[in-house]
Amino acid sequence: MSNHDLILSVPAPARPWRERLGSAVPLLVLGPSLVASLVYVFVFTGWTLYISLSNSSLLPSYDFVGLENYASLWANRRWNIAYNNLFLFSGFYIVGSMAVGLLLAILIDQRVRGEAVWRTIFLYPLAVSFIVTGTVWSWLYNPTDGIQAMVRGLGWTNFSFALASDRHHAIYAVIITGVWQSSGFAMALFLAGLRSVDSDLVKAAQIDGASTFRIYRKVLLPTIAPIFLAVAVIQIQFAIKTFDLVAALTKGGPGISTTFPAIYVYDLMFQRGQIGEGAAAAIMMLAALAVVLVPYSFWVVWRRRKEAGHG
Amino acid sequence: MSTLTIRSLRKNYGTVEVLKGIDLEAQNGEFVALVGPSGCGKSTLLAMIAGLETVTSGEIRIDGRLVNAVAPKDRDIAMVFQSYALYPTMTVRENITFGMESRRVPKPQQDEAVKRVAAFLQIEPLLGRKPGQLSGGQRQRVAMGRALVRDPKLFLFDEPLSNLDAKLRVDMRTEIKKLHHRVGKTTVYVTHDQVEAMTLASRIAVMHQGSVQQFDEPAMIYNRPANMFVAGFMGSPAMNFLPAELGEEGGRPTVALSTADGKTVGLPIVQTLPSDTPRQLVLGIRPEHIYRFDPDLQRRKPGIAQIDAMVELVEPTGAETMAVLRLGAKEITGRFDPDSTPRMGETVTLGIDMARACLFDPTTQRLI
Amino acid sequence: MVDAALDRSLDHRAATVTARRHLLTRLVIYGLLVVFAAIYLVPLLVVVLNSFRDQQEIARNGLISLPRSFRLEAWSQAWSTYCIGGTCEGMQRNFYNSLKMTIPATIISTTVGAMNGYILSKWRFKGSEALFTLMLLGVFIPGQISLMPWAFILGNLGLSNSTYGLIVIHVIQGISFTTLFCRNYYVSIPDDLIKAARIDGAGFWRIFRKIILPLSSPILIVTVIWQFTGIWNEYLFGVVFTSGQQQPITAALVALTASGTNVRAYDVMSAAVLIGALPPLLIYLFGGKYFVRGLTQGAIK
Ligand SMILES: Nc1ncnc2c1ncn2[C@@H]1O[C@H](COP(=O)(O)OP(=O)(O)O)[C@@H](O)[C@H]1O
Ligand SMILES: [Mg+2]
């Protein structure tokens, strides 16, 4: 075969202006959504921050009043309860759903039969809204119709389960429901993490005579440590933004015992017409999120640097 | 007719200078190998020739035409990647025709070309398969087919064999050499494997830390390495470097080495030295230029010098045997015929072929 | 001989002990799984059963009991005749509102995310990494921060109390997520493919269509499911920016369950809850497997 046989076509001469346009295409495509996102992130946040420093009430106004709104916010007992609830809820919700999720993941990881079925059962709540979950669980918590009624109906007549209607314990009803909803998600991520660990590692540990328990504690779980953090960060965001779960489950009650910042913002802005103070409450939510996310993102960057350094 | 000329080419990533003024050329039909340790900038240089990376400064010319700002598709090049870069969702046939479709080559012509290239590389039975269903060697062939079908001015290969196992690599190396003979296209071939470079190339550019250390024919690179880096990089086992001093015996210059028993032995220098030769030297000897001394050898090779050494370790490989020898404070490697291998622990008299030795200036590291 | 026999019987004993312990472990594992499965399934079961039970019977026997009646009326009531705050049209209008909102918002945000991810991973330019990081912040902003700005913007665009307004919100909110998902996935596609295609003469769009898109189904499934369920299930924006007949189904559900007079119509509410939960549930049942796989493949990194 001579090399001429392979000749097919001669490329057309380059047209510079078209090329220059071509190289701008990515920017032109990215541009609009980029601008929209940046406006969403920065302008919206700045705007709300500004309103939180103004004397806006029913309508936005731009008279600067400094930290007045924040002061009156923190002077309010209901807000303090809400902020405390947020930390209480976040802590238990995250630890709870990670613990249950990890347990389920480890159980499923024991080469059980019908793995797909178990996974589907534990994960389906993820597809359901907090509204639906909250509504249904509010029925189950209802002493006259729900779990308490059922158990009493079975003959245990002084059984008592009225978590959601007791102002000291209603927050735990919210936590349990939240854990029910999202432990499946944690399970899925943990399971995927466990599966991604190099199986030679487990074999090596088995040859070293380690028990299953030790293999998990010393080999598998440390290896998937980054997943713990990722799950925690995702859950924290759910926790802080959660408005729907409480709205459907307890409406912040009984009394004000399950008020959350998210509910409080809504009330201030749209029920009581105190936009400035509502904006201040929203900024405080952002602050709570930042307390968690800023160190996390530094950690991520640090880890990436370290990895790059080793690579 | 297609040539490649590169003049003082530079590449910076931010403040990091990755290529520091590269000069290189390939004549029509020439096979140029770029060889060097990983990270020295070979791939970057190749990507710049392909137009995939921008040029910081300098010139790239293909057939004399300045192509610095020309898009990859208009440079009339074809490239084979280390990862093969076969489009995973397309069949082998679609992989091969993708470029022609991009250039709107009429369908009948495409079929014709696929048929020809497939026959040429004997990949007809694979045309309907996806890359995931191919073995490493088959993928490699398909990748070459995709390059070949373009019939470019310039072939670029970026470590095309390094993902293959040892045996297949040797086979494919032979195939590439045959292919180049048949197609006769100008080729730039990147590799970190000096054997590949030696066997394939008509000229080799040895790169290190972003600059070309030496650009020459394989024999010159091997026998007259421009500096200690080239000398050490090309050849396996590597060239032995022995610190030495310039001496004199009977009116002839020698390199003076200290031996195991603390004495100094002068080895006569065969080449004529320039007047500014430093007193401190580095003597470079390739393992295959170290023999077991016998008078017969000296008769055959006039440049042989004698020196005693202790045998520390013997590593037979079958065809030949490597021995680690202690010479004063240094260990050197010698390559011996299995029949005349020294035994471990023995003290042998070595014959060193000074006609093939290289002398380096330890401060500049350059060949004297 | 004797020793060997003894050894063997000891071995045998040890083997039975191990086997028994193994059996016990399996029992514990399956026992725990069954208990947890019950906890996860009972609420669903309760709602499904109650949606077919007679309200009288529910009132008599409580929510959690075996059904002794079967009727479909609750479903048709919940769908088309039940009264929420004065209008007696059931959930159907809100269901359609949610569909009209969710489908376009999902499609648009996914498309934009795929394009952005493609550009930010394969057509990087100076500063693109920084821009991506800034865009990412959108993932973390709580919706409450954007309530006032959205109220103002929607008002000015004349999109208050309309499904279109919600579409705008969900698209802009969603872009951060979809971009993140797609970019992280596309980063794992080797750059050499793009280089090879450029040498082959393919440009920006052709590379996307012919090389990236055919490889994208795992991440597109993740993104679509994430966006669809997220938008369908969203409540805050729905309740803030729409009212009455314009509300999406989540807001209507809350209104419906809150509108209970003294007797709670658990049968109709159960059916309504199921109507509201069904679309994401179906999507999840069909695509859940790919969702988890894709999520762990690329999205969470
Ligand atoms: N996009 C980039 N940004 C910064 N540095 C790079 C980039 N690409 C390559 N480099 C650096 O340039 C040097 C040369 O890389 P490369 O050409 O891939 O080396 P080789 O192919 O010889 O192994 C390496 O040190 C590498 O870290
Ligand atoms: Mg390379």
Image (cartoon, rainbow, N blue to C red):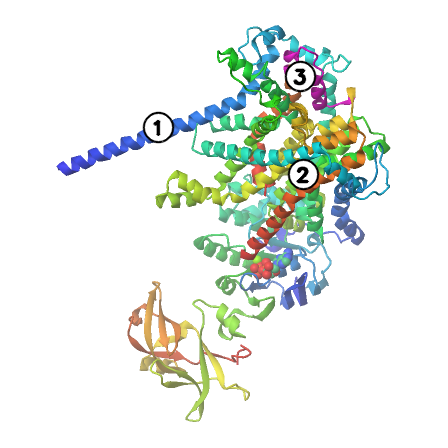
| Percent position of residue A211, x then y | 37, 40
Residue A159 in the figure: left or right of residue C88: left
Q: Residue type at mark 3? A: Ala
Give whichever of discs 3 and 1 has the lower sequence position: 1
**Residue named by callout 1:** C23
Question: Residues at marks 1 and 2, common chain?
Answer: yes
The crowd level at tag 2 (other Cα within 10 Å; few <14, some 14-19, many 20+) is many
Q: Chain of mark 3?
A: C
State whether label 2 is within 8 Å of ligand 1. Answer: no
Question: Residues at marks 2 and 3, common chain?
Answer: yes
| The N terminus of chain B sits in image quarter | bottom right
Give whichever of discs 1 and 2 has the lower sequence position: 1
Query: Which portion, as a residue range, is magenta?
Result: C246-270
Decide: is B284 above or below C27.
below
Specify the farthest residue to the bottom: B251
The crowd level at tag 1 (other Cα within 10 Å; few <14, some 14-19, many 20+) is few
Asked if residue B37 can be seen in this view, the reply is: yes
Q: Residue type at mark 2? A: Phe
Residue closer to the observer: A22 or A141: A141
- Quadrant position of residue C206: top right
